[in-house]
Amino acid sequence: MERDGMAQNGGGRPPSILVVDDERVIGMALAASLARLGYSSAGLADNGEDAVRLCGEKRPDLVLMDVRLKGRMDGVEAAENISRQFHTPIIFLTAFWDEDTVARAKQSGPYAFLVKPYEDRDLQTAIELALYKSRMERELLRAMRAAEAANEAKTSFLATISHELRTPLNGILGMTDLMLLSGLPEEHQENLELIKDSALSLLTVINQILDYSKIEARILELREGDFELSDVLDSVVAPHRLPAGRKGLSLSVEIDDGVPHALRGDHGRLRQILGHLLHNAVRYTAEGRVLVKAALCDASASERCPETGRERARLHFTVSDTGPGIPADRLGDIFESFTQVEDYMTRRHGGLGLGLATCRKLVALMGGAMWAESVVGRGSSFHFTAPFLLRPDGSARPQPATDQARPATGSLQGRHVVMAEDNLVNRRFVIRGLERRGCRVTAVENGRELLDLLAGTPCDLVIMDVQMPVLDGIEATRRIRAGLPGVDPALPIVALTAHALAGDEQWCLDAGMDAYVAKPVDIDRLEGVLLNTLAGKRPAQHSGDTA
């Protein structure tokens, strides 16, 4: 045990122990016992004030503290001060083992109690256990701090990657859209469509990588919002009707009787999961049908959410097809990362093999489960469950999130919009797109130029990038809201940014922006957000994170 004690501090130095006892003879005897056991002395104190002072000066590895001390500060109060200031482990020594004393002493978090008189072996055992526990706690704290630092680094890296990839993609997609509207010959139109399809495919890959990385880094958050189940299913199916029709597939949606429609939850993630499963079903099915179905998990319509106590329903979603099916020996592997059924050298379909792995992790994050059933030659069915809160206003249709809402009636004709954006391509794309809508656009490259312009130039709305040199969009928005001479503090501001990680939308809204749009964005969607903002519509809830 003596060798173990010395090993606690490394370098062969024996642990130093401070003795606190108001009986001088008892304190000296205890110090002698510690010396025999191989520990070094950090001093001897006979009152609480001296004990705290010596801890600050000597920084002992452990304190042996008598509970009852003479003077203004007894052992319990001294221990509380030492633990709070220096985090030094305490072992109480007492000859009074009554319930009141023990209850009060426990509040200071001692590592052990020793009742006088005690044997040397009992003292050594208590000391070694206290030193071991203290060392483990310090190592755990260091590990937690290292993990937090690593997580912060991952978050920063993902935010940078998201911004640096989405910004040029926004320019590629935007300029391609503008060229498609410029009346080019048909052969050039076809080439531009191929460029746009390739850019959208690249965006899908980027989104998958970012989603997977955020889940692995444990920084992805769910965003709750009110929604109608039928609206979500319709919006998921709509983009796949054309490719399904080209292949002659029957694409249908079924919602069982008794399934509640007015729900609250992360409908953005629900769309993402269903959208990926439906995309795979249509892509891999050559003939027959694809079915999306929603049902209750059991006969009961609802259950209680353990966190909030509110009523919720657990839904069972199924996406089934009549495709080639999945061999039984591969069925357990399809949810693994970077795994596909086809061999990577001979496969006919692209992809990273992250889609199903991400979907399963998202389902687990939502509190559900995901599995698959398949018969080779007859098709596959992908199932998942997820709980959603029931809305008390079940008969009312919710207002969609701003960036997905139907645009308010009106026009941008004659409106003056100021755009703060440091990227030249993105500026040109937005300017040309909005000018086609009859809008007058003035562009600046940073927040400082924006504030200078607004001081002498009235406008109807500001489109604000977040990351800009000189003065960023967040700080520029705060200064506008705080009040600037000649500038309306209620001036509508819309964030148009490549910052699209969880929390970025709320970050922008908290700074005072009225709406948030993540790059890349098409002009039609941007126009809808601008019209809604000019009409006074504000985002009432968050949509799912689509990064």
Image (cartoon, rainbow, N blue to C red):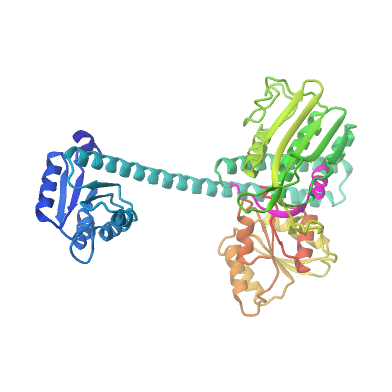
Examine the image and state in which quarter residue 135 appears.
Answer: top left
Name the foreground residue: 305 vs 204.
305
| 176 in the magenta segment | no
Residue at image position (17%, 40%) is 119
Instruction: Identify whether 212 is placed above or below 221.
Output: above
Position of residue 504 measured from the top left corner of the image (x, y, whole percent): 61, 55
Position of residue 128 measured from the top left corner of the image (x, y, whole percent): 25, 39
Residue at image position (72%, 65%) is 538
Q: Is residue 481 left or right of residue 297?
A: left
Instruction: Identify whether 383 is placed above or below 392.
Output: above
* Residue 9 visible to the viewer: no
Name the foreground residue: 354 vs 188.
354
Q: Is residue 143 left or right of residue 393?
A: left
| 227 in the magenta segment | yes
Position of residue 5 measured from the top left corner of the image (x, y, whole percent): 22, 38
Examine the image and state in which quarter residue 392 appears.
Answer: bottom right
* Residue 345 visible to the viewer: yes
- Number of numbered tags placed on the structure image: 0
Stretch of the chain drawn in magenta: 220-237
